[in-house]
Image (cartoon, rainbow, N blue to C red):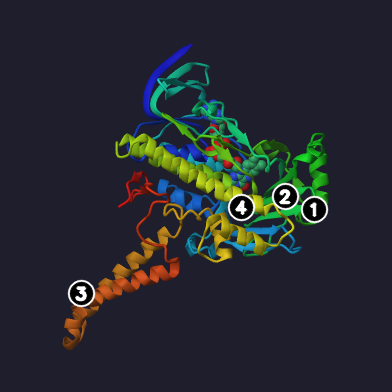
C-alpha cells in the first residue's frame, strides 16, 4: 500500500547514539526533524565502553548528561591494559588529561539497550518526531541533490518524506551510505574478527579501578573485559584475520579455548558463568567492521557514525566518533538552514574535522598494535599523532578520552570553567560586602575597580592554572575554516 507523502527539514535514518544526538541538536534550533528507526527499542547493540567526551561533552550539549548520571551505569575512570612488552598490567586514568576536569574524569560502561533508549527518548522530549519500526529503503534525489527518503513502516506501508537534508546514521549495515556517491574503503591493517558474549560473576579490578575496561593481549589477539554491572561482564576476543577458522566452528568451544589461552581473563572468569538467555544469551561474531567512506557528504546528504566510518574496538572510539560526527553535521545543517554559511563551506568543515579525529585515532591505533614496545612508546605515538604540546602521557589520555581535538564542546573542562566564573563573581560580591563593613580608611581602596579587576584576573589565572593555557576564544582548526558558535550548535566565521 502507498502511505503518506510528508515534508520535514531533516530526516535522520537510525536511532543509535549518532542519529539521536544529531536529531536533538537540530531540533534544539527549532527545525522539524523526523527520525526513522528500523527496530523497536530497546534493542541490543555492541559498543558499551564510552569516553568522557561523549558523556560529559556532547551529552551535556544535548541536555541528557544529568539523566545519564542518574541512570546508575558503571563509572569508568580509565583503562587497565595487559598490553605491549610490559608483562604487568598498566592503568591510565582520564583525570591525567588537562582537558578533562576532575569531576568529569570518568565515562560509563553502558548496556547499550538502555543507553540508546535514554538518548532516543531524550530526542523525542526535545521535539524530534521519532518513529520506530520504520525502515528506510532508499533516498530520493534529483538534479544532483538528495531530497528525501522512502521507507516502509511496521505494517509494510510505504511512505516518503521530502527534506532539505537526509542524514544516514544507520550504522554498519547501512544500505544507503553509498548514495553519497562514494564507496567504503576497508582497512588493510585492521582486519580482525570479534567473538563475544556475556558472563555473570566475573572478578573485578581492585578499587578505584573496578569500573575500568580491562584489555588483555595474548598470542591470537586480545580480550576486552567490560564491567557492565557489579556482576555482569561483556567479554570479547578480537582475533587476527588469519585465525578466522578458529571461530568458524562452534563459537562456544572457540571462546572457551581463546579464554584458556589468556591467563588474565582465565583468572577473572574463574567461577563466572556465561549468560545464555535474553539479549545477552548468544555468542556473536563481527568482522569487516573497519572502514571509512571516501566521502562523508554530498548536497542534501551526510553520513555519520558507523555509516561513515569505524576503526577498531580498542579504546572505545566508536560512540565517540558517532556522536562527534553528529555534532559536526548538526552544526553544518543548522548553519545552512539559518542561511548563515553556504553549504559547501559548512560541510567541508564537517568532513575535515571528522576526518581529523578519525585519523588521530586510526594512526594512533596502528602504532598501538605494535606489541613489542612498552607503554612509554604508545604515549609518545599519541603525542606525535595529535601534535600536542602536553606531556606524552597527557597526550595519550587526551586522545583516548576523546578530547585531543581541543574542541570546547568535547573538553569536559567547560563545566569547570563555568563553576570558576561563578565562584569568582561570588568572590566579587564578598568583596563588596566587606567594603560595606570595612574601616573607613580603607574603603576607597576596596571600592576601587582596580582591586576588583585584579581579583577577576586572579580568578582567570586560577582557571588557566587548573585547566591549561588553551582557554579562550575558539580559533579555527583549519586555515580559513569556521569556528563553533557560542552555544556550540552551529558554525560562525572566525572573529
Ligand atoms: P548504531 O548504534 O549501529 O545505530 C544504528 C541504528 O540504525 C540502529 O538502531 C539500526 O536499527 C538503525 N537502522 C539500520 N538500518 C536502518 C534503516 N534502513 N532504516 C532505519 N533505521 C535503520 N564503540 C564504543 O564506543 N565502545 C566500545 O567498547 C565498542 N566496542 C565495539 C566492539 C566491536 C566488536 C565492534 C564491531 C564495535 C564496537 N564499537 C564500540 C563501535 C560501536 O558499536 C559503534 O561505533 C556505534 O554503535 C555506532 O553508533 P551509530 O549511532 O553510528 O550506529
In percent of width and height, residue 273 lies at 76, 47
Give the mark toward the camera: 4 or 2: 4
In percent of width and height, residue 459 lies at 34, 71
Give the mark toward the camera: 3 or 4: 4
Dot 3 surroundings within 10 Å: few (below 14), some, or many (20 or more)? Answer: few
CA–CA distance in space, label 3 to label 4:
50 Å
Dot 2 surroundings within 10 Å: few (below 14), some, or many (20 or more)? Answer: many
Image-based side of 222 in relation to 260, left or right: left
Q: Residue 460, located in which quarter of the rendered image?
A: bottom left
First in residue order: circle 2 vs circle 3: 2
CA–CA distance in space, label 4 to label 1:
25 Å
Residue furthest out toward the front: 479
Residue denoted by label 1: 262
First in residue order: circle 2 vs circle 1: 2
Residue at disc 2, CB closer than 8 Å to ligand 1: no
Which label was assigned to residue 223?
2
Which label was assigned to residue 449?
3
Q: Dividing the image into four equal quarters, which quarter contains ligand 1? A: top right
CA–CA distance in space, label 3 to label 1:
66 Å
In percent of width and height, residue 79 lies at 63, 58
Q: Secondary structure at mark 1?
A: loop
First in residue order: circle 3 vs circle 1: 1
First in residue order: circle 4 vs circle 1: 1
Amino acid at each position: 500500500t502507498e502511505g503518506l507523502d510528508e515534508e520535514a527539514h531533516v530526516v535522520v535514518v537510525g536511532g543509535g547514539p549518532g542519529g539521536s544526538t544529531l536529531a536533538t541538536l537540530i531540533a534544539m534550533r527549532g527545525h522539524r526533524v523526523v527520525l526513522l528507526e528500523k527496530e523497536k527499542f530497546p534493542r541490543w547493540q555492541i559498543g558499551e565502553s564510552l569516553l568522557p567526551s561523549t558523556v560529559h561533552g556532547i551529552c551535556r550539549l544535548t541536555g541528557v548528561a544529568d539523566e545519564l548520571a542518574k541512570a546508575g551505569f558503571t563509572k569508568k575512570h580509565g583503562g587497565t591494559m595487559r598490553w605491549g612488552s610490559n608483562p604487568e598490567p598498566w592503568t591510565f586514568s582520564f583525570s591525567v588529561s588537562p582537558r578533562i576536569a576532575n569531576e568529569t574524569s570518568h565515562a560509563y560502561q553502558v548496556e547499550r539497550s538502555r543507553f540508546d533508549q535514554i538518548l532516543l527518548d531524550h530526542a523525542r522530549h526535545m521535539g524530534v518526531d521519532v518513529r520506530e519500526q520504520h525502515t528506510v529503503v532508499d533516498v530520493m534525489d534529483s538534479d544532483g541533490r538528495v531530497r528525501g527518503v522512502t521507507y516502509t513502516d511496521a505494517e509494510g506501508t510505504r511512505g516518503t518524506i521530502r527534506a532539505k537534508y537526509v542524514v544516514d546514521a544507520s550504522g554498519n549495515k547501512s544500505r544507503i551510505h553509498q548514495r553519497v556517491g562514494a564507496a567504503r574503503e576497508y582497512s588493510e591493517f585492521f582486519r580482525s574478527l570479534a567473538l563475544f558474549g556475556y558472563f555473570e560473576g566475573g572478578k573485578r579490578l581492585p578499587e578505584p579501578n573496578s569500573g575500568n575496561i580491562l584489555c588483555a593481549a595474548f598470542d591470537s589477539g586480545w580480550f576486552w573485559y567490560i564491567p557492565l554491572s557489579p556482576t555482569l561482564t561483556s567479554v570479547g576476543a578480537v582475533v587476527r584475520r588469519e585465525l578466522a577458522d578458529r571461530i568458524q566452528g562452534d563459537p562456544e568451544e572457540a571462546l572457551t579455548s581463546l579464554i584458556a589461552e589468556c591467563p588474565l581473563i582465565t583468572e577473572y572468569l574463574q567461577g563466572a558463568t556465561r549468560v545464555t538467555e535474553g539479549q545477552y544469551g548468544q555468542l556473536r561474531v563481527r568482522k569487516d567492521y573497519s572502514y571509512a567512506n571516501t566521502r562523508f557528504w554530498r548536497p542534501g546528504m551526510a553520513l555519520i557514525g558507523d555509516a561513515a566510518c569505524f576503526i577498531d574496538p580498542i579504546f572505545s572510539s566508536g560512540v565517540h566518533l558517532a556522536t562527534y560526527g553528529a555534532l559536526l553535521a548538526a552544526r553544518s545543517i543548522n548553519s545552512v538552514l539559518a542561511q548563515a554559511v553556504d553549504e559547501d563551506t559548512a560541510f567541508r568543515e564537517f568532513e575535515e574535522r571528522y576526518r581529523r579525529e578519525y585519523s588521530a585515532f586510526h594512526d594512533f591505533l596502528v602504532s598501538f598494535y605494535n606489541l613489542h614496545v612498552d607503554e612509554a612508546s604508545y604515549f609518545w605515538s599519541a603525542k606525535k599523532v595529535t601534535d600536542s604540546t602536553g606531556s606524552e602521557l597527557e597526550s595519550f589520555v587526551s586522545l583516548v578520552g576523546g578530547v585531543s581535538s581541543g574542541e570546547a564542546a568535547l573538553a569536559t573542562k567547560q563545566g569547570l570553567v563555568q563553576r570558576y566564573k561563578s565562584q569568582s563573581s561570588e568572590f566579587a560580591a564578598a568583596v563588596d560586602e566587606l567594603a560595606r563593613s570595612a574601616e573607613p580608611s580603607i574603603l576607597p581602596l576596596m571600592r576601587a575597580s582596580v582591586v576588583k579587576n585584579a581579583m577577576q584576573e586572579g580568578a582567570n589565572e586560577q582557571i588557566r592554572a587548573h585547566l591549561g593555557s588553551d582557554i579562550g576564544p575558539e580559533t579555527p582548526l583549519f586555515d580559513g575554516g569556521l569556528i563553533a558558535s557560542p552555544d556550540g550548535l552551529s558554525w560562525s566565521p572566525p572573529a
